[in-house]
Image (spheres, rainbow, N blue to C red):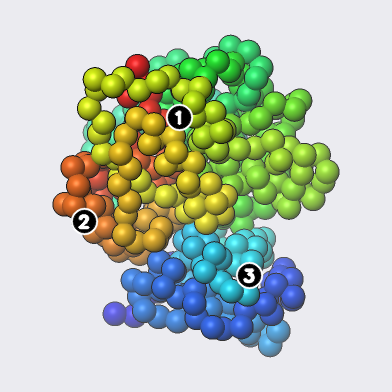
């Protein structure tokens, strides 16, 4: 079957991509990225690989090739997992290249359709997002939401939000995660405070980090949200993030905004497991009479490949549980932020490979629960039938 991305029907047209020539030239075409690319793994087609996408970028940027539906399809079917980057011996900054290309396409109205842009705007208006999420949860129960979108059952009630108890660290709650997984924020706060620290929360305006906007090429919106987020958490306290995608975006604000203030802010951002791993002995002592469960760990791509902070998850979990590894070397699960909704067929095929790895781990151990430190991954895998919890939901349950 001939695979295509979403057909935009814009017609062929020459446009300029906002790419750095040195970064674009850094790929030597060795192909070591191919086994680590989820879309190449499921299609076997060169155009759906990092090497193939870079080649397509070059033909447009350097040879004046038109931006046609085939080119747009190559770019829109990239999950942006960045699993290719650690595998690349030349250090190609593929994430920068694909984000810049998506930005060029979005600014030229060649990608990111109107409905997606509208959804991205809602993320920056938290009260509207909460109301919309409740309505969506009602629609789910009335069976009005197509299953192909891949949403797990959304909460009708969220419970109380995280409240400030002091100013030792900030707990970043974000947009979608606060709307759909607020219980994980409460668990995160309890685990942090079990070390003796107190928690602050962002002031109004710091509810969305702009990660999904950057992925969609909506860079101007992402910059506006990043500036708001920075202003919402002043001072020098560490900013702890329990969503891998948000943490990766916030650590990259220095590049996104290009200011010293942004770089100083990014230096304060930590994945919450990084902070906890450094204080592992401050967590409550495990109950020796309680059976240690086995937990499968799935690494979100933006935690493993971008932040390179996946090992602290294991340190934290291992205090109370036995960690079971997957055999796929961190291959993407196919969630990719909004990717699973925009590219459901490819996302489903990518997820099937991850679910196969999870099944093998279950068969080889006593584990039945998967720990994943990113809301998109956990919801995507749960929609495929896996039992998935955030690592700190698990730790919160196992702490004395």
Dot placed on the residue nearer the N-terminal end, 1 or 2: 1
Q: Is residue 89 left or right of residue 64?
A: left
Q: Residue furthest top?
A: 165
Q: Determine whether 264 is above or below 218 in the image.
A: above
**Nearer to us: label 1 or label 2:** 2
Tell me the tag on residue 91: 3
Horizontal and vertical percent for residue 140? 28, 36
Q: Residue furthest bottom?
A: 63
Q: Determine whether 20 is above or below 348 in the image.
A: below
Within 10 angstroms of label 3, few (less than 14), some, or many (20 or more) residues?
few
Residue assigned mark 2: 360
Residue contact at pointers 1 and 2, CB within 8 angstroms? no
Q: Nearer the viewer, residue 156 or 209?
A: 209
Q: Determine whether 394 is above or below 101 in the image.
A: above
Within 10 angstroms of label 2, few (less than 14), some, or many (20 or more) residues?
few
Tell me the tag on residue 80: none
Q: Is residue 243 left or right of residue 20?
A: left
Q: Residue at x 79, y 50 (%)?
A: 258
The part of the image, by quadrant, that contains residue 53 is bottom right
Q: Residue at x 31, y 19 (%)?
A: 287
Residue contact at pointers 3 and 2, CB within 8 angstroms? no
Within 10 angstroms of label 1, few (less than 14), some, or many (20 or more) residues?
many
Circle 2 SS class: helix
Q: Determine whether 150 is above or below 15 in the image.
A: above
Circle 1 SS class: helix
Residue assigned mark 1: 179
């Amino acid at each position: 079957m001939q695979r295509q991305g979403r057909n935009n029907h814009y017609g062929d047209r020459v446009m300029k991509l906002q790419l750095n020539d040195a970064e674009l030239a850094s790929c030597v075409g060795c192909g070591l990225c191919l086994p680590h690319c989820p879309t190449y793994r499921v299609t076997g087609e060169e155009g759906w690989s990092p090497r193939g996408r870079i080649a397509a970028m070059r033909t447009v940027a350097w040879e004046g090739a038109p931006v046609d539906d085939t080119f747009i399809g190559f770019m829109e079917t990239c999950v942006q997992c960045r699993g290719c980057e650690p595998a690349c011996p030349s250090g190609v900054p593929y994430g920068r290249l694909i984000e810049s290309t998506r930005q060029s396409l979005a600014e030229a109205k060649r990608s990111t359709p109107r409905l997606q842009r509208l959804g991205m705007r809602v993320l920056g208006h938290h009260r509207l997002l909460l109301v919309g999420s409740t309505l969506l949860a009602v629609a789910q129960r009335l069976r009005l939401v197509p299953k192909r979108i891949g949403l797990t059952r959304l909460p009708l009630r969220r419970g109380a939000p995280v409240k400030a108890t002091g100013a030792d660290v900030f707990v970043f709650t974000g947009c979608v995660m606060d709307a759909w997984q607020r219980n994980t924020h409460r668990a995160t706060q309890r685990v942090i405070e079990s070390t003796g620290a107190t928690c602050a929360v962002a002031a109004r305006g710091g509810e969305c980090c702009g990660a999904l906007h950057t992925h969609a090429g909506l860079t101007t919106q992402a910059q506006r949200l990043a500036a708001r987020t920075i202003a919402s958490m002043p001072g020098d306290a560490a900013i702890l993030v329990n969503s891998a995608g948000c943490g990766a975006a916030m650590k990259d604000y220095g590049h996104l905004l290009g200011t010293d203030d942004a770089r100083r802010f990014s230096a304060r951002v930590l994945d919450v497991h990084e902070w906890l791993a450094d204080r592992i002995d401050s967590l409550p002592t495990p109950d020796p009479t309680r059976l240690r469960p086995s937990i499968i760990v799935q690494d979100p791509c933006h935690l493993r490949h971008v932040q390179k902070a996946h090992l602290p998850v294991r340190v934290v979990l291992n205090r109370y549980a036995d960690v079971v590894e997957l055999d796929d070397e961190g291959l993407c699960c196919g969630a990719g932020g909004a990717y699973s909704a925009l590219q459901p067929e490819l996302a489903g095929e990518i997820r099937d490979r991850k679910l196969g790895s999870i099944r093998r781990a279950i068969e080889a151990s006593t584990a039945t629960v998967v720990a994943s430190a990113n809301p998109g991954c956990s919801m995507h895998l749960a929609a495929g039938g896996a039992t998935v919890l955030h690592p700190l939901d698990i730790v919160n349950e196992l702490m004395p």
